[in-house]
Image (tube, rainbow, N blue to C red):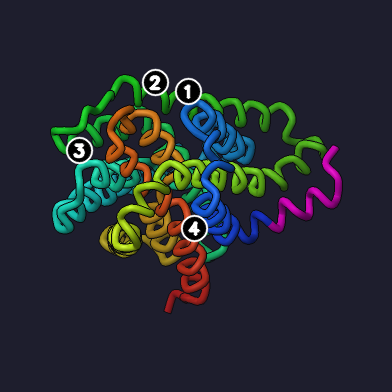
Amino acid sequence: MIKLSQMKLLLFISRHASAFVILTAVVSFLCPMLFGWVRGNVSSVILGFIMLTMGLTLSTDDFKVLVKRPQDIGIGAVAQFTVMPFLAFGLTKIFGLDPYLAVGIILVGCCPGGVSSNIMSFLCKGDVAYSVGMTTVSTLLAPLMTPFLVWVLADTSINVDTVGMFLNILLVTILPVSLGCLLNYFAGKSENFKTLQSVMPGCSVIGLALIVGGVVSQVQPQLVSNGVALFFLVLTVVFLHNGIGYLLGYNVGRLFGFPLAKKKTLSIEVGMQNAGMATVLASAFFVVDGNPDSVLCVLPCAISCAYHSISGTILAGIFAKWKDN
């Protein structure tokens, strides 16, 4: 049984997710050996746990929206897998990024919507059912769409293992989400399970922070040798990718005549990506032994993990004040 003090700590962490992730990144940069163990299979297991926490929150009612509103979900899914991937590709060309930095940005763009987007949709008084439906569909499509889009958009000098990525996403995303849904279906009404659900967001934030810490420990030598210029270059691209994604997502909603709540939700769903998944995929499939430059591919993913949480929280606060008039 979870103690009251542990529950309060996990709830505190979930409310201050951005600060916790950034603090972990700073600690990892200053003392990379602390997070050197968060690599490879360890990162995949942690991501699987994060996706399990998403599954634990999904009920049969959440899937009904897919049947009731297939057109709206379809519009959102198309926006998800066109706006962010091709925007990422365009930005890498405009800024002339190194192929490994470029594939990191493209990976972020090609991943499904972020798990925390559902929370942001609630905070901004958006359409939460639509948010959950979009996140679910984009996650289910990810095993096919993410490898395919990365293969299409990545530099030809980068080897893209589409089959390996497909299997990896199935294993660390679809399987845990499905398991979480089953657990919720069979045990969701028990008080102990409801208590578990309440602390899962805090646990997933800890998992995300560990993934980011592991990435920062990997790229720390490159950041030290290249100075702050590299960091701010990548941060600028991440800022534009995320911000323009929010803007285009909102305007897709306007184009199709969505009500305000749904436009706000679509904006957040399109702009906020599952950067944790991108980080794990970058580490597993694009970091090449003997090629120190290849580790740069994880840097945009790690920065996106922290930045998307910050920008999503800020945007949700702004959107919450918007009225229909």
What amino acid is labelled 1 in the image?
A: Leu
Identify the residue at image location x=43%, y=35%: 280
Nearer to the camera, 299 or 311? 299
Q: Earlier in the sequence, mark 3 or mark 2?
A: 3
Pointers 3 and 2 in contact (C-beta within 8 Å): no
Q: Which residues are magenta?
A: 1-12
Nearer to the camera, 235 or 6? 235
List the single residue furthest toward the bottom. Answer: 325
- Quarter containing the C terminus: bottom left
Mark-to-mark CA distance, 4 and 3: 25 Å
At label 1, counting other C-alpha atoms closer than 10 Å, the crowd grade (few under 14, some 14-19, many 20 or more) is: some
Q: Which residue is mark 3?
A: 154
At label 4, counting other C-alpha atoms closer than 10 Å, the crowd grade (few under 14, some 14-19, many 20 or more) is: many
What amino acid is labelled 2 in the image?
A: Leu
Q: Which residue is mark 1?
A: 171
Q: Which residue is mark 2?
A: 167
Q: Which residue is mark 4?
A: 309
Q: Secondary structure at mark 4?
A: helix
